[in-house]
Amino acid sequence: MKIIITVLSLFYLQAVLALEPLGENEMDQILGLGGVYLSGDLTINDVGGPLNESGAEPGDAWQQDCAASTNERCGARIAVRTNNTSGWIVLDNLRGRFSFEGLTLKTRLIDSGFDNDGASSSDGASFDRDVFEIGLPNTMNFSNVSYTLANSNKARPTEVGFKQTDIFNVKIDGNVSLSGNLLLFPTGNP
Amino acid sequence: MKNMKFKIPAFLILIAFSISNSCFALKALDDISLSAVQAQSGLTIDQSQLLNIGSLSYTDDGNDLTIEGLRFSSQDDINEVSQLTYTMDVSADGTLRVETDVKPTQMHIDGIRINNSMASFGDLTLNYEAVTNFNIKGMTGGGLEGSFTVGISNADLIWKTNGYAMSFDNIGYNASVDSLTLEYDAIDNTKGFTRTGLDIGMDNFDFSFSTGALSLEGVSLGELSGALALSATAQVFAGGRSSDQGLTLHYQATILSDPNNYVRFTDDGNSLFMGDFSGEINLTNLTLDVETDYLAIGFDQLEGSLNAGKILIDDGAGNSDSLKSIGSIELDFTLNDYIDADDSNDNRYNRFQLAPGITRPDFDAMPDQIKIYAENFYNYKSLLIPVGQSNSGQPNLAAEGLSLATQWNLANAELSYIDDTRRVVFSGIKSFGSANTTIDVRDEKLAIGISDLKGSYSIDGLRVGNENAPLQGGAELLLSIEVFQAMDFDIDGYTEITAGGASGGGIRIDGDYFFSDTTIGLSIDEHGEGIWATGVNYDIHLRDITFDVEGDGLKINRGEQWSTMDIANLRWGDKKTGTSLGRIKLERFEQNSLLAIYPGGAGQVCVGGSLNMDGDGCSGVGRFEDRGEQGITVSLRAAFADEGVTSDGTATARNRLTWENNRKESLVAGEYDNDSGTQIIFNNFSTNDGTGSSDSNVHGFQANLNIDVYETKVLKKTPNADGKFEELIYDTDARDTYKYVLSPNAAQKALRPLGFAVQGHITFKELIIDEVQLVHANARTTPQTVFYGVVMQNLDLTTNLTATPIQ
C-alpha cells in the first residue's frame, strides 16, 4: 500500500522536485542492488465511490448509480479551506484511469557521470551522494481522466445550504510522455 | 509410599530418559508379529499405585534441580491408587515384549526449583491413560534393538502459576517406531577429548497428536493437531557445556516426504492448515546444565530445512471453502555460534537460561515511555505479596513463573514463497541478539514480558525464479506489510494473551511495546547504503486485539491501537553519517480496525482495462493475466479515530504527521535537538462515514490487496532504432542472462521477470485533516495555520501494479 501511496504522491511531487534526463552512460553508473520496477494502472472511481453505494439514505446527495454516469457526485472530492471564515476550494468529480509501464524506484549513489559524455568535468563526482530515484515511465496513458475545479460554501454536498460554483472542468484522454528521473535527496539543515 | 525423598545421580536420569519411550504406547499386533509369539504363558502384572515422592533432585556440579511433590494417583481421588497392567512375553527370536495398559492416572508436580529457590516454575498436572507395546532384543555385537508403539488418550496437561491455570485439554498422541536401536558406541570429540555415549536410532518414527483445546481458565484459544513421519538418530553423552557433568546431545532427523504430514490450528471449526511437510534438522552439541540459579540450555549449531507444500484455510476437515491456497514455503536456516577473533564483545551464541519465578527488569533503566506500563505489568496482584501478610503489596519473590534469558545468532536463512510454481526467495536473512523474558499465568491470561530485546536483523535481497538466481533488490516490497529490510532494535514489550477471539475461541492480545533508539533500513543495498530511519523511538499500545480463524480467512480485529513513531533523522546513504531529511513523527490512533488475510490472489485480471463478462479476457483495451488460484489477499480496514482519550485513560491520542527540519545541532556531532526547528504538522486526521467527525466510523480507510507472484512486462528504458521499446526476457529458467525482445512469443513470455503483482482496491468515505500548520522555531506556541481543514470524500481507487525487483 505504501508503494501505491508513493506512486500517488508522484503526481504532487513533480512540481517540486528536480527533473533530469539520464542517458545510457549515466544509467550504467548505477550502483547497488536496490530497486523496484512498477507497471500497471490506477483507476479512480470507475463506477463511483463508497458514498454512492446502494443503501444510502433516500435523498442523499451521494445516492447515484454511477456505472455509466458522469454525474459529478460519482467522483472523488477534495475540499480545502484556506481561511477560517471563508469557503472551500474544491477538486471535485475526480475520475479516470492512469496506466504506465516502467516506473522505477531505487536508491543509488551518484559519484560519477553527468559530464556531458566526457566533454566536461563530472558533476556526479562533485555531487557524490545517495539519492532516491524515481525513474519515470516513458509513457503514461490517461483514459477518461476528468476533474472539476470549484468553489463551495460548505465542505460537503450533504450539508444544509450547500452551494458550489464550478470554475472549469477538465477531461483528459491520450498519452503523456514522461521521461527522465526524479531524484530525491535531503539538502539544507535537517 | 509417602513423602519419600530421593537424590539421584545424573546417569540414572540419563538412563530413564533413554528408555522413557518404553513407558507408553499401544498398537495392535499384526499377524506376522503374532505368529512369532510362542505358546509360553508369559507374565502379567497388575499394579495399583499411589506414589508420593517428597522431592526428587537431579544434581549437576553440586547444583540441584528439584522436583517437589511428585505424585502418581487416581484421577478421581489423589488419595486413591491408579491401575496399570504389564503383560510380558518372550518370542522365539528372544524378543522381550512388554505391553502396558495404564488406566486413568494423574501425575502431579507441586513445583520445580533450582537450589531451593524461593520461586518455582509452577505446578504441573498430567491426566492420562495409555497403552504401549514395546519389543526389544539384543543385537549382535552389543546393544538393543526393537520397536514400539504408544497410544495416549484422554490426556490433559495443566500448568499453574500462583493459582491460575493454562491447560491443554483432551490430548491424544499416537506414535510408532518401526526400528529402534540403542547402542553404547557413539564417539564425540567436540570438547577436545574423546568420550563414548549412547547412540539411539529411530527409523520411520510416525506420530500424530491432537489437543481438543488449549485453554486459559476454561476458555479455548483453539485446537491443535498434527502428524509427522521422520527418521532420526541421536547421540547422548554425559557432560554438559560447563563441566563433565550435565548432558550433551547430537541429533539428526529427516522429515520424511509424506503428503500426510500436517499441522492444523482450529478455531470454532475453521482451520489454518500447513501440510505436505518435508525437511531435515541437524543439531550439534545441545547441552543441558544446572547452574546456580538457572537451567542452562545451549547448542553450537542447528541447521536444517523445512518445507510446507500446502498452506490453506479450511473447514477443519480438510475441505477448503474456496479451494484456494496461499501457496507453499521453503525455509533453509543455520543458527550457530560465532566467535569474533578480534573482539570477544562481538561473539554471538545460541543459549537459553531458564530460571524459576519471575525476574523483574530494572525499571529505573527503562525509557519513560514504557516504564509505567512495565511497572503495572509486574505489579499484577498475583505477583505481589497478598493482603494480610507482612509487606503485602510488595513484590513476591516466591511468585511462580518462568524467566528466560535468551541469546541467538541466525547466521543465515533463505525463505522461499512459491505461488503457482513461481518462486520468490527472501535471501540472506540474518539476525542476532538477546532478550529477557518472563512467562506466567494470571487470572484468565497468559502474561509474557520481554525486556531488553536487543539485536539486529537484515535481509540481503531477493532472488526470483529460483534459489540460485542473482541477488536483486526489492526487499522494499515488504514495506507494504510493515516488514523492514533491516533493523537494529532495543525493545521492551509486555503482552497479555486471553482466550477467546471476536467470536467463540481464538486469541485476544493486549500489549504495550517500546522501541528505543532503533535504526530501520527502508531501502538499502548490499553495502548498507540507502535510506535509513535512525534514532527511532516507537511506542505501540494494543488493546483488545483478537485473532480468529474464520471460514474464509484469518481475521485480526484491532479494538484499539495508538502509537507514536518518532524518527530523529531520515538519512540518505550511510545509517550513521548520511545526510538527513529531518525529523518525522507519525502519531496514530485507531479504533475497531480490521486486518484479514485470505488464501488466493487476484485470479483473472485485466491490466489497463476492464475484465470481460466471462472473466477470460479484457473488454476492449488492456492486458489480460491469469494469476492462478494461489496467492494471498490482505484486507485492511483502518478506522482512524478523532483525537481523544484512550479507553484505559492513560493517554490522549490522535493521528498526526509532523515533519521538522532546520533544527539546532546537538552536543553530539551529527545529531539535532527535536522541537528546535521548523515544523509542518498535519494535525488530527481521521476517517468517518461521510458527514464529519461526529459521524460513525464503520467504513474507515479500506485497502484490499490481492498479492500474487507473476511475470512482469519490463521494458527497456530507451527505444530501439525504430523508436519502439523492447521487453526484457530471460534466456532460460536459470534467469541469470537475458535479452531484449520486441514481441515475445508465449514461451518467452513465461520467461519474463517475476515480481509481486498487487491488485489493490482502496476506498474511504471521508478522510479529514483538521488543520495543516507551520510552527516556527521562534514562535512555538503560536503556530500558523496553512489550511483550516481538508475534507476528502468518496474515493474508490483500484490498482493493478506489478512490482519487480531490479538490479
Image (cartoon, coloured by chain):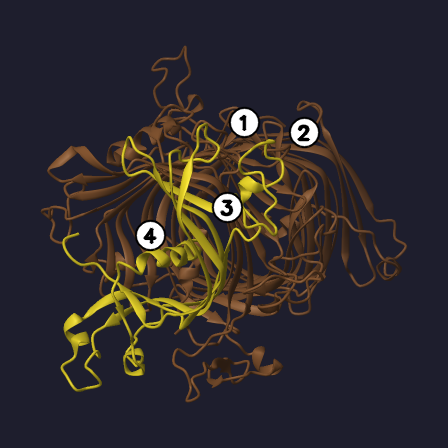
Looking at the image, tell me whether mark 4 or mark 2 is earlier in sequence order: 2
Chain holding disc 2: B
Q: Which residue carries the number 2 mark?
A: B73
> CA separation, marks 2 and 1?
28 Å
Q: Residues within 10 Å of mark 2 (few under 14, many from 20)?
A: many
Chain holding disc 1: B
Q: Quadrant of the C terminus of chain B?
A: bottom left
Q: Amino acid at mark 1?
A: Glu
Q: Residues within 10 Å of mark 3 (few under 14, many from 20)?
A: some
Q: Residue at x 35, y 49 (%)?
A: B434
Q: What element does badge 1 sit on?
A: loop
Question: Where does the image place residue B222, in percent across and percent down from the top left?
Answer: 63, 39
> CA separation, marks 4 and 2?
47 Å
> CA separation, marks 3 and 2?
79 Å
- Quadrant for residue B214, please give it: top right
**Who is closer to the viewer here, B394 or B323?**
B323
Q: Residue at x 77, y 59 (%)?
A: B95
Q: Colour of chain B?
A: brown
Q: Which residue carries the number 1 mark?
A: B444
Residue B290 visible somewhere in the drawing = no
Q: Which residue carries the number 3 mark?
A: A72
Q: What element does badge 4 sit on?
A: strand
Marks 1 & 3 on one chain:
no
